[in-house]
Amino acid sequence: MVFLSLVNCVRSRGADKFWKRRQILKLAAHFYGRKRNCYSVAIRYVHKALQHAVCGRKVKKIERGNLWKERITAACEELNIPYPLFMENLARCDILINRKTLADLAIWEPRTFKCLAQIAAAKNHIQPPTVKAALEPPPEGVITRGML
């Protein structure tokens, strides 16, 4: 766009300032007191609230991961297989299921989770990682090629 005079080229600052302040005050609409209405006070609290929101998203991911791990650990303890051994043997069997899905299976489909635990225990018996694991008897109800 070509401007013939310098007056048209200069940008107006009035409307932009209004909309920027309005955006901050909209974000502060649920605050109490002057934090809600006074721009100079509201902007500080809005920035701090946005910082807390970023930290909260990170904490939420960490807490979800811990919750999934606890649920899987509890289900593994019921089936007498340690969590690290369970996860390692599932990986060795090329069963690539993430922790969220395993936690959901442990809660909503315990029979499926029990089958996965039996497969992991059978893998531990067929290819034991330690000498102690080689001396354990094979799990009941699981038949693999190595047992035939």
Image (cartoon, rainbow, N blue to C red):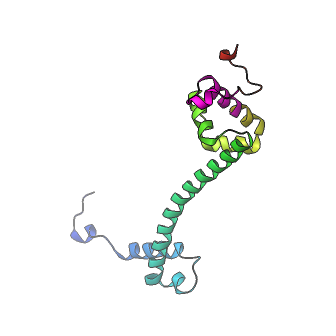
- Residue at the image position 72 percent from the left and 37 percent from the top: 113
| Relative vertical location of residue 108 with respect to residue 50 in this rendering, above or below | above
Q: Nearer the viewer, residue 124 or 111?
A: 124
Percent of width and height locating residue 8: 27, 68
16 vs 56, left or right, is: left
Number of on-image labels: 0
- Residue at the image position 27 percent from the left and 70 percent from the top: 10
Point out the stretch of residues depicted in magenta. 117-137
Percent of width and height locating residue 47: 45, 72
- Residue at the image position 53 percent from the left and 63 percent from the top: 56
Is residue 5 inside the magenta stretch?
A: no
- Which image quarter holds the N terminus? bottom left
Specify the quadrant of the image occupied by residue 40.
bottom left
15 vs 4, left or right, is: right
Specify the quadrant of the image occupied by residue 100.
top right
| Relative vertical location of residue 108 with respect to residue 21 in this rendering, above or below | above
Q: Nearer the viewer, residue 22 or 108?
A: 108
Percent of width and height locating residue 24: 48, 74
Q: Nearer the viewer, residue 35 or 62?
A: 62
Percent of width and height locating residue 42: 48, 80
| Relative vertical location of residue 109 with respect to residue 14 in this rendering, above or below | above
Is residue 134 inside the magenta stretch?
A: yes
Q: Residue furthest top?
A: 148
Q: Nearer the viewer, residue 60 or 88?
A: 88
Magenta stretch prevailing secondary structure: helix
- Residue at the image position 60 percent from the left and 53 percent from the top: 66
| Relative vertical location of residue 57 with respect to residue 48 in this rendering, above or below | above
- Which image quarter holds the C terminus? top right
